Image: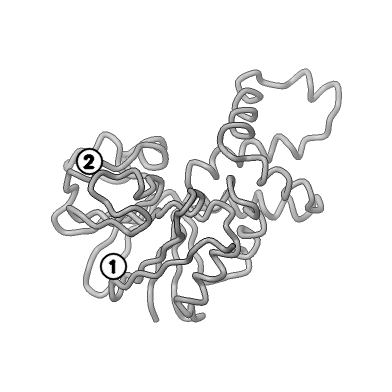
Amino acid sequence: MSTYVISDIHGEYDMFMDLLEKISLQDSDTLYILGDILDRGPHPVKTLRKLMLMPNVICIVGNHELMALESLKFLMKEVTAENIKKLDPEMLDGFLVWLEHNGGRTTMDEFEALSREEQKEVIGYLREFLVYEETEVAGKDYLLVHAGLGGFDPKKDIEDYSLKELVWDHAYYETQYYEDRFVVTGHTPTQYIPGAKPGCIFRKNNHIAIDCGAHINGGRLAAICLDTGEEFYSYPHK
């Protein structure tokens, strides 16, 4: 019975399946996904629907799920004169930014290929994602969150952080947030963390950064076993 964490799959379905094989995930294990399952890569919705079939998976929301959720709900609306009149310019702008600048096109294409019932199931699943998780594994305490703790204050309870601070704001790896627990994050590819080895899990100051840039040229998809600290990697398929 082991606990694994993966983050920022970004539609790299083949890499994800390869990684599941490498960790030999059992039904008795728990797998946390720290968000950004969607967008960029070729099969984001296919990856999401695979996760929907895995009862031992716990998903935490990433900024790409937040962007996609609003846009996918918009896509499900019937095109009528009344609905067009109700279009919010800010929502429409957000949709276009998601589509053109945040890799949303692959998510949209796969979503639109689903039946209406399947689309509803996907939306319902996304709405159930947690914002963060606190867990103890092998006598160590962990905080699992997509991005980090923006505006960090040691006196601040985790419940007091805003959604933006947890899902959008990047972790500051030079600061040790807690002495007695580890903060596991995705969101910031290790290719962009000063002092990190690109494409490898980064550990410093009780931070564990596990986004190894699966969607970046030369990047990898990573998993960590919290019980043992063992790292696993999947390389892009040729």
Name the one closer to the observer, 233 or 167.
Answer: 233
Q: Position of residue 229 (x, y in %)?
A: 28, 71
8 left or right of 80 in image:
left
Mark closer to the chain start, 1 or 2 = 1
Q: Residue furthest front?
A: 238
Q: Secondary structure at mark 1?
A: strand
Residue located at (48% from left, 41% from top): 63
Residue located at (25% from left, 41% from top): 172
Give the vertical position of 1 relative to 220 (above or below): below
Q: Position of residue 32 (x, y in %)?
A: 44, 63
Name the one closer to the observer, 141 or 92.
Answer: 92
Q: Secondary structure at mark 2?
A: loop
Return the mark for residue 192.
Answer: none
58 left or right of 182 in image:
right
110 left or right of 30 in image:
right
Q: Residue furthest left?
A: 179
Residue located at (45% from left, 68% from top): 31
Q: Amino acid at mark 2?
A: Lys
Q: Amino acid at mark 1?
A: Glu
Find disc 1 in the rendering and name its residue: 136
Q: Residue furthest right?
A: 80
**Quadrant in which residue 83 is drawn:** top right
Q: Position of residue 158 (x, y in %)?
A: 29, 46
Q: Position of residue 188 (x, y in %)?
A: 37, 45
Find disc 2 in the rendering and name its residue: 156
Distance of mark 1 from mark 2, alpha carbons? 20 Å
Callout 1 crowding tier (Cα within 10 Å): few <14, some 14–19, many ≥20: few
152 left or right of 210 in image:
left
**Quadrant in which residue 78 is drawn:** top right
Rendered-image quadrant of the N terminus: bottom left
